[in-house]
Each structure stands twice: as C-alpha cells, then as structure tokens.
Amino acid sequence: MSTIGVDIGGTKIAAGVVDDDGAVLARTRRDTPATDPEAIEDAVADAVAELRAEHDVTAVGVAAAGYVDATRSVVVFAPNLSWRHEPLREEVEKRVGLPVVVENDANAAAWGEFTHGGGKGSRDMVLLTVGTGLGGGIVLDGELVRGTGGMAAEVGHLRVVPDGHQCGCGRTGCWEQYGSGSALVRWARALARTEPVAAARLLELSGGDPDAVMGVHVTQAAEEGDVAAVRLVATLGRWLGEGAASLAAVLDPGLVLVGGGVSEAGDLLLQPMREAFAGALTAAMHRDLARIDAAVLGNDAGMVGVAALAARP
Amino acid sequence: MSTIGVDIGGTKIAAGVVDDDGAVLARTRRDTPATDPEAIEDAVADAVAELRAEHDVTAVGVAAAGYVDATRSVVVFAPNLSWRHEPLREEVEKRVGLPVVVENDANAAAWGEFTHGGGKGSRDMVLLTVGTGLGGGIVLDGELVRGTGGMAAEVGHLRVVPDGHQCGCGRTGCWEQYGSGSALVRWARALARTEPVAAARLLELSGGDPDAVMGVHVTQAAEEGDVAAVRLVATLGRWLGEGAASLAAVLDPGLVLVGGGVSEAGDLLLQPMREAFAGALTAAMHRDLARIDAAVLGNDAGMVGVAALAARP
Amino acid sequence: MSTIGVDIGGTKIAAGVVDDDGAVLARTRRDTPATDPEAIEDAVADAVAELRAEHDVTAVGVAAAGYVDATRSVVVFAPNLSWRHEPLREEVEKRVGLPVVVENDANAAAWGEFTHGGGKGSRDMVLLTVGTGLGGGIVLDGELVRGTGGMAAEVGHLRVVPDGHQCGCGRTGCWEQYGSGSALVRWARALARTEPVAAARLLELSGGDPDAVMGVHVTQAAEEGDVAAVRLVATLGRWLGEGAASLAAVLDPGLVLVGGGVSEAGDLLLQPMREAFAGALTAAMHRDLARIDAAVLGNDAGMVGVAALAARP
Amino acid sequence: MSTIGVDIGGTKIAAGVVDDDGAVLARTRRDTPATDPEAIEDAVADAVAELRAEHDVTAVGVAAAGYVDATRSVVVFAPNLSWRHEPLREEVEKRVGLPVVVENDANAAAWGEFTHGGGKGSRDMVLLTVGTGLGGGIVLDGELVRGTGGMAAEVGHLRVVPDGHQCGCGRTGCWEQYGSGSALVRWARALARTEPVAAARLLELSGGDPDAVMGVHVTQAAEEGDVAAVRLVATLGRWLGEGAASLAAVLDPGLVLVGGGVSEAGDLLLQPMREAFAGALTAAMHRDLARIDAAVLGNDAGMVGVAALAARP
C-alpha cells in the first residue's frame, strides 16, 4: 500500500509515492507559486495526478512550513507562503478526491526519520533541522507531539540567552539565533571583518568580501581543516548541544537527530554538540545520555514522513 | 474501586485511600526515616496496612522525590532520600501483596491535577510545582510524559541564564534558580541587606535579621501590599512566565498549572507570570495562549495522582 | 582669546569661532567629501579661512569620529571616513598655519560639556552620547581620559550581555546594542511586526510599515503618552542606567550626562535610567549616587569642546 | 626619606618602613582586633611606634579594605571591619603625631605596583587583585583614579552577566562572582559533586569531600597538569580576560597586572586570560593590546603603595 507525500517548500514542491517501507517509488516536482494559495493547491493536485497515473495510492500527505492546526487541516500561519488560516486539507481533498492529511514540515520530517530513518526503533526522539533556521519535531512514546494548538516543537524559539540576539519572531535570544546556519554565517562574517588574518580561508572562498561569506564556505573550510572555520562549526555545535540539554531536561529522549543542510558538517558539528550536551545536562551522571546522531533521510524526510502519516489508519 | 496513594516526602509519608473520583476517603501519616530505604519501605507498608483495615483497595501507588526508571519500578536516584537504584516497587509489593506502581512525585502531582484537579478536561498540560525548588510534570495528549529513562519533566533544570546562578545540580542558570521559593528568599535577603528601608516590612517580619527573611514573610508582606514584596513576587512570576514560554514553544500546552507553596501568592504571582508569558512566547499573536492557573489539589496532588496511576488497568 | 572648533561628521563639517566662555561667535558649514581625506582636509581649511576673515583666533581644534592617537595628531581608524593612520593634525596645520589639536568627537563633546555645558563645576563626569550608536567621553579629576593608545571611553563596547546581540564591531552584547537609537528602532520594529495592536501609533507614524518605524516615531509617540512607546523608551533608559552603574563601579563619577539625539526624550528616558542606575549600582546605600542629567550643548558640544581643547596652553 | 605603610587586613595588620625605592627596611605585624575600631587604631599606633624606634620616618600611610572618602581621611564603610564613617586619618594622626594618609587597600596596592612594582614605567594601568574576591586599582595618566566619592575601581562589581550569580553586594552577575577564587572554588565543588571521575585529583586533595575542595587544591592540581583543574583555572582566566576587555574599552590602559593569591597560577591563568581579552576587546585589530602580566609585589603591594602615597608631597 502506498501513499503520496508532498513537501511544499519556499521555492519547490516535491512530491513522491512512498511505500510501507518508506521507499520512494516515484517522484515529481513543481515550482512553488509562492504567494497564491490557490495556485499552490493546483500545483499540488497536478503533481499528485501525475504520480497517480502510474501508481495506486490510498491517501495524500501534505507538509508545509507553517503552523498547522490541531486537526491537521488548516495552515494557521505560514510566514513564507503568506497563508493565514488556509483550509489546505479541504482544498486539496476537493482537488484530488483522496483522504488528505496536512502537517508542519519539521514535524513531518521527524515522523519520517522516526518511521523510516535514523529514529527507527526508538521511542522518544527529537529531530533538530539545522538549516537557515532551526526547526524541530518531537516524538514521545511513539507519537508525534503536536500540542493543543498544533504548534508544538517550535524548538528554535526556546529562549537560550535572555536579551540575546534579535529573532525574526520578534523575541530575543531564541535558540535559532545561535543554533542555525544563519548564526554560523553571522559569526563568520563578523570574524572576516574583524580578524581577516584568521579568516583568510573564508575570505578566499567568498571572493574577499566579508559580507559574502556563506554557510557552505564555512563548512567547506572546516572540512579542509581551517582552524577558524572548525572553531565556528564547533561553536554552532556547542549551542546545539546546550539547547538540546535543556530539551532533554524536559523530554528525556533517547535520541536526538540532527538534520538540515548544516548537519552535513558531520562530526565537526556533532562531536562538540555531544560534549556540550553532556556538560550542560542536569544529572548527567545518573542517566544514560541521549544518543546524538545525524539524520539520514536528507531532503526526503518531510515527504516520506507526511506520506507515512497519510498511511496511518 | 479505590486505590491507595502514598507520597514519600523528606520528613513525612502521607498515605490515603482514593476513589475513582479522586476523593480521599481516609488518610494516615508516618514520619520519614529519611536515609534508610528499608525503614521507609516498612513505614509505607505499615501505612498501607492501616488503611486497608477499613478499605478495600486494588492497588498501591507510591510517589517519591527522585528519578524513577522507565518501568516505574526503580528509584534510580533520590537526592534527599539517599536512594540509588532502589527497587521500590518490588520491595513494597513484597510487603503489601498488591500491585504497586512507583512514580516521581512531581509527575504524580501532575497526573493528580490532570485527572481530578485543575487539569480535568484538558489534554496537554504542564504542572509547575514552585516550592523550595521548581518541579514539574507534563501531560501530552492525555498521557504523562516520562521519557526514555523516566527522567522527563525536570523542568527546573531548563537553562534560562547562561552562566547564571549556580544550581545544586552542578550546572548554572537552571530555571529553578530563578523560579522557586529559594530564589525568592535569595532576592529578599539581598534586598534586606542592601536596601533596608525598602525592605522594612520584610525585616520586621524576620525579626530584623536580613538572613532570617523567609518565603512566607515575602508572600505575607506582598499580600499586605508591601511594595518591595509585591515586586519580589512579581519578579518570581516573571521568571516563571518566561520559562513557561520556552516550554510552550516546545510543547504548546493548553494549560499551565502552578502549584507548590509559593503558588499561594495567587494572582500576585500569576498575573505577572501571565504577562511575561505572553510577552516572551514566540508567535503569541498567531495562537491561543495557554491558560495559566493555580493548581487545586494542594499537598494532596501527589497522593491522589499516584493513586490514580495505580488504578489504571 | 578665541579658537576655532571643527567637527567633522559623516555628512557635514561644522566649524565655529568659540571664545573663552564657550560662546560661538561665528559659524560655517561644509559638506563632508566623505571618503577622500585630502578633500576633507581642504574643506576644513576652507571653513577655517572663512571664519578667520572676520575673527582673530590662536588655534584650531578638529573633532572626528574615529580613534585618535595618544598624541592627538593621527586618526588611527575612522570607520565612516575610510581613514587609516591619517596625520590629520599635520595636514591641517600645513593648510591653516596655526596650531592644531585633533580629538575624537565624543571626547571633544565631553570636554565641551565639562568646560562650558552641563558638566561645569564637576570634577569627574561621564558623557554618554546616545544617537544611532552609543559614544562617550570621560573626565576624571578635571582631565579627559584618553588611555595609552588614545582609545579610551569607547563605552558603547562595554559588554553588557554575554553572547548578546551582534555588534558592528564584530563582538557581541556590546552596550551600544542595547543603549542606542538603533536598539530602540530594532525593538520598535519587532513590536510593530508582532504586536500591531499595541504598536498602532508607531505604525500610524511609520505609514503602516513595521520596518519603516524610526527613532523619532518612537520618541514622538512616547511624548504623546503612547503606552508602548513610553515602555520602549523606558527600556532604553533601563539599559543606559544599568550600563552606567557598571561604569560607576569603575569610575565613581559625580555626574553622568546624556546627550545625543535620543536624549531629547528627556525624563521619559532619564527617569527610568536613574532608577535602573540606583538599582544596579553596587553599594548604592553607602554612597551619594551620581547625578544623571541631560547634556546641554546639543550638536555644538564637539565643536565647542575641541575649540576649548585647542585653547589650552 | 622613608615612610611607614600599614595594611589592615581582616586578620593581620602588616606594617613596614619603606624607602624611596620601595624597599621595605623593617617590618612588624599585629593581630587585627577585628570589630573594634579603637583597638585597631591602637594596634596601628603601636606598630608604628615599634618601627619608629629604629627608623626615621616622615609620614604614615594606612591601607584598609573599605571605601575611603575622597579626602583620604574617613573609612566610609568597611564590610569586614564593621566600620561606618570612621575618621581613621584623624584617629591615627592623634596617636602617632605624624601626617597620615588613608587609602583603600586595592588602590594602595595598585599604587605600589605602579611606583615600585610591575607597573613601573607605565602610565595607564589596572591592577586586578584576584583573591577570595576581585578587587582592583586604576592608574590613569600617572594618577590613581579615586572618583568623586573615593569609591572608584570597584571593578569586581562591574556586571558581567545580567541576572547572573548572586553577589554578596546584593546585586547579581558581578564580575567578582566569575573572576575570583570564590568562583573557582564554587565551580570546582560543583564538578566534584557531579563528575567525581573527572574531579578525581581534586577529591583526592580535599580528602574525598566535594565541599572541602579549596582554591589551593585547584591551583596545585592544575600545576600538576590535572586536566579538570587546568580547565577550571582557564575558565577563571577567560572571565578575567573578558571583563578586562570591557575595562579596556573604557580605559584603554597599556597594562593590566594580575595580583592576589590566585595569580600564583601564573600562565595557566594568564594565557587564557590574554586570549579571551584579545577575543573580546572591541577594535582589537586597530590597537596595541594591553600587556597582561603578573603583579610582582605580592602581599607587600598595599603596604608599599600606601607608604609611597604618604611620601608624596
């Protein structure tokens, strides 16, 4: 039995037929007509139709970057898609004539990793998605944590520094401002401006302009062994570990998975994260520390996860 | 059908027969023979025997201040009771000949409030127990969150200030150091030492000694309208609200209950907490804010809650 | 006996003839040819020549926004004027044929306030210039504090929040990121984005665009009594007071003057600043608190001050 | 020409005859009759009399741990000596019949290092005295900075962490709570309690009791190369360096000397301090960094310094 998972991103819509084992049997993509909900819904329906031409499916799951309500029907608010209270489930069901389930993309990715990725066999896990921002999904006792309003797992907005760096959400000191690719870039550019000798390799990669240093420059330089870049990635890892320790005090998960583009730095990121986690977690001496590992499904996590949600009875 | 709930505190063991509606039909108490596990187990058994003489019960629940393992059998570590890996369930079952369930006292209290107290009718709630320390229990989707190792809901050890006040747990900046009766007393004493005029009423209540100011002096003075005391209680409320906002970013509960001795300050504490919560929670504009209210079961919460846990099939 | 004071700003060069009492007898202005040191020096000489046509003067003082070396001759680094190790004193002396003294603009302003403004009669004072950034000048025992390298009084880069908001200087948590007009604007925009109802008046003044809210909108709304704006200005005042308390622990000045555009908010800013200062200063009970007051010379402070420095034997 | 310097400590009064070159020609000591001002003044007079029996002196300087007023006559407040507004100068002059000058002990020590110790030849320097607390003295342009009320250089009460560790002064997050022997001990004990394996050597030195770990245990273990102790001393060095960077932003000294008992850790402390200083100081790229070095006069600094102050015309 297969279902279709659709992941609506800011620029691309990725859709795929996913079987019971999480295998992606077929794929297709569409551009995201970003600010027009109806056009997005049409594009989703079109992609679904294309996939159904060759595959029998029983349901459709749709993941989107936004707050999805507790009934998994309505996108309450999607900052990048200009959606407000969009009845996405109903609109897509109308178009495709199949049962539809809607989920926040980070939650979907967590469910994907839990059912078919790095979280298989675990019971309580947290997925941190470290990209431009810091997203997350939480599985406790084998179930996705959604909260009363469906807005749970906004882990990036845990406050880690009172009066800290301004966050786009309007608050200050959110974890996302310290545990994300944006933070890495902010620190790297500051270094390039004020310590150009130490940042020589970063400046070389950015063409000499401190403000053109990008996350990939930092991770590339770190992989080459550049001291300053290794230190920057380790700083990011430290913030991730310290924040994860706060999460673990609350949730005591057995597993923390790290996905998103920045996670490609691998142990350059994860090893400092593990050390900081152990150093910051209360009562570390009296417990088995959560395993901290890289997520495995990459960009497919959301699509696979939401397909798996659609397949649930 | 009734069960017995036993709450092992640092100085007293409270036990009661609790019916399906959470009513306490009978009670008894024992002193806690603090550092001798066997003596404690004997005292528990003795209290249970006394209650069973007059009441038919089907099971016993035991709550204790400590980490209880994932199987609800073993107390892994109880700082005040000197327990290490104590097989409390087995030991009590052996003595009473009934099914026994063991739970952390704050978790038990949360379950008590959820089933028979201020949380009735909710689905996702957090109980904060603000006493000397800051404990908590979490219910999500109608189930207690225990975590892989049974150590979840140690909310007092969420880090709220990097490099903040030293915590007894060995880390720094734990929420407990800002959101507890101990914090309130620390601030009050500092005020009494350095601003005796502002702290005149507090000093009067403490007999003139800044280091003799106690939490009850602060709450009493605040209830009388003493400006300095009102401000201290509000500061505590603010820290509770800000920490609760971090919790809400992660869990999105519909309800936050505040129990423990300090919660008797009522709206002097809760109103500043609500304001700080609204001001610190990400995307507050896009969601229904969790209700923040006083817990209702008082000191019975743990006993009632663990009895209710014992009553589950 | 008169001297000429020249204040080189980012867009305008202001010059004036200043007598022994600090009175400005004549004035002229030039545009700043921003990134060409020679052109700036020519413009300074031209302004001086114009003023000397009508006034007898004995010396010229030049204030510039940059690090001025210990000999008051060389501008080591001026971020906005693209100067690096510019021998400004020599270049201007060559052009005008009079003794020249060069000073950092904030230091000059402090000296102006000390000799002819709000600091007259004091001995130890700090001037805080709260504009886009946060500058300062320090007078101790009647002398300007310049430091071994001439870079003293960069008070805006006192670190007030570890890992706080990113500063343009490359570090984080500098006082300037909390005690400046830029901070005020950052907070106001965040409020306008996330709490549009509370920020209604600010949005009205900015034409409805959260990102168009400016500092003058905030101070205007605060003066009208708008609650949100009053609170924002008070927050700025609080940060100024808390930072000033750290300065006072180190310097124990009798007077703290607040100048710069934002200081026009008057007691809306200064009263919260005074309260925060008293609340944050160590041993406040055992000392006379420094007076905190508005500076009086306004935009003339730098010109008057550097003229007064030039008049010293 | 010689003068006598007297350093009143919490337990001992040290007095010495000091010549123009800072050489101590003779010494004597008395116990401190701690809480009786008159008895202390008698003991000071007695020590002076003993020294004058063999040496011709022209004046007496008295250093004490407390706030000394701007006229160097009155001890406004001395926490450990129970003094409030004690006219120490007058009382000692009455007893010894020589001109007397009174100075805060840390200021005196700074003057000692400046005139006859590690600061000879400098112009702007800061002395940090890292003992149980964190004291300091500041010399700018060759003069001791005393401030309007005589309370300058209370550098230990610069706030480095908002809402940080409670300080004995009643405020929170004072530098002293992070840059002192007390901080070192607090961290070491926390480590010993929660990570006994890592802290094995510390526990060995303390006889197995985490709460008996002392500062000397940490410095001894660090000198032996114990990893945990080295890291603790480096953490202290880091806090000292970061705080010193804030001081340097304000004062731009050419020299920072580190004295006090903890400074005996030498480069184990100073090297991390230097690195943190360079990393935290604004515009580090554009300036010569202050030299950071160990003070050289040890416990004599206060006595020598106050004798040198007494020798000034």
Image (cartoon, coloured by chain):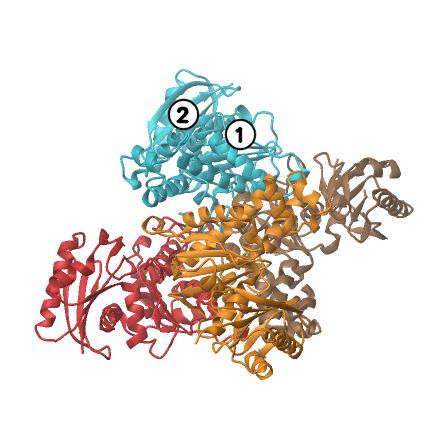
Chain colours: A brown, B cyan, C orange, D red
Q: Which mark is residue B15?
A: 2
Q: Which mark is residue C275?
A: none
Quarter-wise, where is residue D26 in the image? bottom left
**What separation in Å lies between label 2 and label 1 (alpha carbons)?**
26 Å
List the single residue furthest toward the top: B54
What x and y, as percent, mark residue B234?
A: 47, 37
| Secondary structure beneath label 1 | strand
Q: Tell me the amino acid under the disc marked 1.
A: Asp
- Give the mark, 2 or 1, whose residue is nearer the N terminus: 2
In the rendered image of this protein, does residue D281 appear above or below residue A46?
Answer: below
Quarter-wise, where is residue D62 in the image? bottom left
Mark 1 Cα-neighbour bin, 10 Å: few <14, some 14–19, many ≥20:
many
Q: Quadrant of the N terminus of chain A?
A: top right
| Secondary structure beneath label 2 | strand
Quarter-wise, where is residue C96 in the image? bottom right
In the rendered image of this protein, does residue D112 appear above or below residue A175?
Answer: below
What x and y, as percent, mark residue B295?
A: 50, 28
In the picture provided, is A216 more to the left or to the right than B279?
Answer: right
Residue ID for mark 1: B293
In the rendered image of this protein, does residue C127 appear above or below residue A44?
Answer: below
Q: Is residue A145 visible?
A: no
Q: Quadrant of the C terminus of chain A?
A: top right
List the single residue furthest toward the front: C54
What x and y, as percent, mark residue B107?
A: 50, 35
Q: Tell me the amino acid under the disc marked 2.
A: Ala
B204 or A253: which is nearer to us?
B204
B289 or D56: which is nearer to us?
D56
